[in-house]
Image (spheres, rainbow, N blue to C red):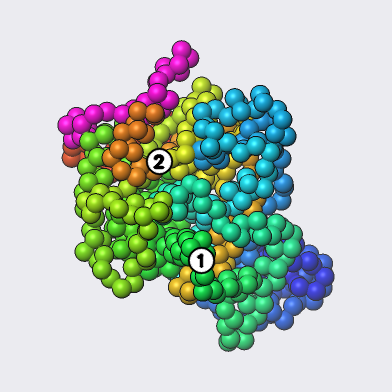
Amino acid sequence: MICLTQCNVWTFVRSFKATVSGKQLGRRGSKGCMLCGNGFHPLLVKMENKGSDEVEKLKTKFLSVWHNVKYSWALKSKTSFSRNSPVLLLGKCYHFKAEDDDSLTEACYEASDEDFVMGNVEAFRKDFASRVWLTYREEFPPLPGSTLTSDCGWGCMLRAGQMMLAQALTLHFLGRDWTWSEALTLQPLDTETWTTTAAKRLVASLEASLQGSHRSSDPGLPPMPQAQAQGSAEEADAHLKEMYHRTLVSWFGDSPSAQLGLHRLIRLGLTMGKQAGDWYGPAVVAHILKKAVEEAMDPGLAGITAYVSQDCTVYSADVVDSHRAPTAGQAFAERSDAPPSPQNNQPASASALPDSRAVIILIPVRLGGERTNPEYFDFAKSILSLDYCIGIIGGKPKQACYFVGFQDDSLIYMDPHYCQSFVDVSTSDFPLQSYHCPSPKKMPFSKMDPSCTIGFYSRNIQDYERISQELSKVLQPSAKEKYPAFTFMQGHGRDYDLAADMTPEKREWPFIRDPRRTVTTAGDFVLL
C-alpha cells in the first residue's frame, strides 16, 4: 500500500499506478506503505473496503493523475531559436537579428516583403500564441460508444487535426494577419508546479467522492472580462473579431453538442470502424474532419467545406465542385443563434454568392518508407512558407503533433500532449487561455514520421486556380527527387475510375492497414 504522509505527490502517483495495475491493492497482510513503511492512510483503507466496483472507479481517477504527470513532459524544456536564421510560421517569415543585415531577406524562401518581419521576437511570439491549441482534456462527458472521459494517451492525432482545422477557420473568418490581443499575456507553463497542483486537486476530488460528495473541476483560470460598449470603428472591429474567435473555439469544445469537438469526431470515426481509445492515423483523421465539416449544422459553418485527395492526387474538377455546391446547413442560415455574418472588410467571404463556399483541402501523403526521405525536407519547407497552408498533421511514432513552421532543419510544432481540465464552452465568458500555447516546440526533420496530412485553405475558385498553379511549381521533382509528394489532375476522380465501389477506408491505401498485408505499425502510423 501507499500512504500520503511522507511520500511526495509525484512519487505517490507513480507508485499508485503500479499498485492499481498489479495485485498490491488486494494484499491485507502488509501493515505499511510499500514506499516509506508508514501506516495505512485512511483514504486507502476506505478504498479497500469499498468493493471492486469502487476500486475500478478509483483506479480511473488515479490513472488520470498519472496522465497529468506523464503528459506534461512537453513543457519541461525551453525551445531555443537561432538569431542567424529565418523562422517561418504558416507563411509568415520572422528574423530575430538586427535590421541592418541586408543579407537576411533572401533567406526567407519565397515569402513576400509584406510577410517579412525583421528583428521582432515579440511579433513571432504573438503570432504563435494566437494559433488555437487543442490538447488532451479530462473530466468531460463520456465519449460515444465508451465510458472514457479523457483522451489522454490516444487522442493526439485527433487533437492535431482539430488544430489544423481551427487554423483553416481562423483564415476564413479572421485572416492570416489576425492575432489575439491577449496572446502575450499568457503565463509560461510551469511543469513542476502544474503537475503537483493537478495531482493534489484530483486526490482531493477522490477523498470527496469517498465521502459521497462531488467537487466540480476548476480550470484555475480567471474568466474573460465582459466586452465593453464599443465607442469607435476600431473597437467595434476588434470586438467583432473577438466574437469570431470565441465562437470558433467553442466549436471545438469537449461536449456532444460541439460542432467540431472530440465527441463529434469519435462518433464519425465509429462509421469507419474506429472507436474511442483507438489509434488514429493522419489519413483517417483527414476523412473524419471532412465529414465533420460537411455535416456541421451551425449556420456559421455553412460557407466552408472540406475535400480529401485520393491516392495523393487532387482532382481539380472535384475541388471546383466543392466550391460551388450548396451546403446542408444553408437551410438554417436564418436561425437566430447564428453567429454574425462577416463584414465586407473582414477576411471571411462576406460578399460571396450563395452557391460559393471556401474549401479546406486535405492531402494525406507519405514522404518516404520507414523514415522520411531527406529529399522531401525542402518540399516541406516550401509548403510551410505558403500563407494559405494550414499546416501539417503528423509527428513521430506514438506522438502526433501539428507542424506550423520551421527554422533551418527543425520543424516548429504545437504539441497536444498536455492534459488539461474540461472547459464548459457553452458559457458566454468561458476562459480562452487554455486554448492558446505560449511555448513553441522544435523537432528535427529527420525524426518526422513519413505519414502525414497536408492542409490548404482555398477561399474561392479563383483562389484555387492560383494555389494549384503555385503548388504545381513546388511539386516539380528535382534531379534527386523522382516522385512528387502529390499531384494535381484535371477532371473528376470518377473519370479515372480509381475509387469505384471502394469504401473510404480502401481509398486511403497505402495509409491504413490492409488486413491481407503484413505491415509493421508504430503508434499512429503504418510503416510499409
Residue 15 figure quarter: bottom right
Residue 452 figure quarter: top left
Q: Residue at (65%, 59%) from the top-left corner? A: 186
Could you tell me how far apart the alpha carbons at marks 2 and 1 are, in whole angstroms? 35 Å
Which residue is label 1 attached to? 232
- Horizontal side, residue 377 vs residue 456: left or right: right
Residue 207 rendering spot, x and y as whole percentages = 65, 80
Q: Main secondary structure of the magenta part?
A: loop
- Look at label 2 and name its amino acid: Phe
- Horizontal side, residue 372 vs residue 499: left or right: right
Q: Which quarter shows the N terminus?
A: bottom right
Q: Residues within 10 Å of mark 1 (few under 14, many from 20)?
A: few
**Magenta stretch, residue numbers:** 472-498
Tell me, yes or no, whether the highlighted magenta stretch contains residue 483. Answer: yes
- Height in image: 148 above or below 322? below
Q: Residue at (70%, 57%) from the top-left corner? A: 188
Which residue is label 2 attached to? 456
